[in-house]
Image (tube, rainbow, N blue to C red):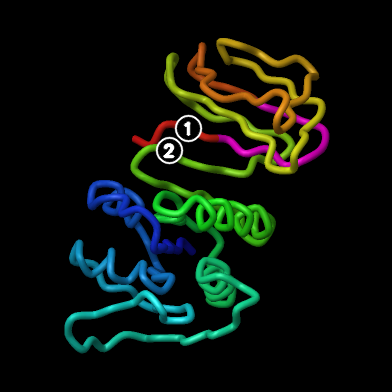
């Protein structure tokens, strides 16, 4: 089952939302993400969070789950709800932009929940974000942006195929070496690594 979660970060725009919502079974707004959905004419099945950002102009008949727990942020509450509702594929929109601390927290939450779902993807108007399994391949177009970031601080044993600047059993480490602004050289790329957590960023279509 496919679920889409919309957060209260930068508005991804209606074009991105339309693409993400295709074949969506469960639409969840993480607190103020409901404002984004309503602005674009979409109605969520559930709104969850501490409700400090949701500001409807008129009364609405929503399924609102108020959760004041300050140990988890609104995205985590939405992911818990998606899991409880048996979602297997999740797309998160609006998790980045605006405040950097919120964006970093949301990426940390996505890392924490990577094993909860079969597929967990974050999308904004610029990039797609995915925590990679140890072995990963995808179809792409030559020249497409491919950026890698060591979410765990350091990632070892990285080997890539199909990239303009390949890695051969090498490492990436925060503050020393990252893998930003690489690009696909072939129609399919393959990325494997041995340890750590690796974030893949590709251009949002």
* Residue hosting label 2: 127
**Does the stretch in magenta take in 199?**
yes
Relative to residue 97, is residue 191 depicted above or below?
above
Give the image location of residue 49, x and y in percent: 48, 78
| Image quadrant assignment for residue 105 | bottom right
Disc 2 versus disc 1: distance between alpha carbons? Answer: 5 Å
Residue toward you, 45 or 167: 167
Residue at point 47% right, 32% down? 202
Residue at point 31% right, 85% down? 62
User: Can residue 114 be seen in the rendering of this structure?
Assistant: yes
> Quick check: marks 2 and 1 in contact, CB under 8 Å?
yes
- Secondary structure at numbered mark 2: strand
Give the image location of residue 101, x and y in percent: 54, 55
Judge from the rendering whether residue 196 lies leftward or rightward of residue 164; answer left or right: right
**Does the stretch in magenta take in 23?**
no
Residue at point 20% right, 89% down? 59
Judge from the rendering whether residue 100 lies leftward or rightward of residue 205; answer left or right: right
Q: Residues within 10 Å of mark 1 (few under 14, many from 20)?
A: many
Magenta residue span: 191-200
Judge from the rendering whether residue 95 lies leftward or rightward of residue 170; answer left or right: left
* Residue hosting label 1: 202
Q: Residues within 10 Å of mark 2 (few under 14, many from 20)?
A: some
Residue at point 46% right, 23% down? 145
Relative to residue 121, is residue 126 depicted above or below?
above
């Amino acid at each position: 089952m496919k679920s889409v979660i919309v957060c209260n970060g930068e508005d991804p725009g209606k074009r991105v939302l339309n693409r993400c919502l295709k074949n969506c079974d469960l639409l969840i707004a993480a607190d103020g993400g409901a404002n984004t959905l309503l602005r674009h004419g979409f109605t969520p099945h559930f709104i969850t969070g501490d409700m400090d950002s949701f500001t409807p102009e008129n009364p609405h008949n929503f399924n609102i789950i108020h959760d004041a727990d300050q140990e988890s942020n609104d995205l985590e509450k939405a992911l818990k709800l998606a899991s409880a509702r048996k979602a297997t594929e999740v797309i998160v929109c609006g998790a980045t932009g605006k405040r950097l601390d919120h964006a970093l927290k949301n990426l940390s939450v996505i890392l924490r929940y990577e094993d909860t779902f079969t597929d967990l993807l974050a999308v904004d108007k610029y990039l797609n974000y995915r925590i990679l399994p140890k072995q990963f391949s995808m179809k792409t177009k030559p020249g497409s942006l491919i950026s890698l970031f060591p979410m765990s601080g350091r990632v070892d044993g990285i080997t890539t195929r199909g990239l303009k600047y390949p890695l051969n059993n090498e490492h990436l480490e925060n503050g020393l070496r990252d893998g930003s602004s690489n690009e696909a050289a072939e129609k399919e790329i393959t990325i494997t690594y041995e340890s750590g957590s690796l974030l893949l960023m590709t251009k949002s279509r």
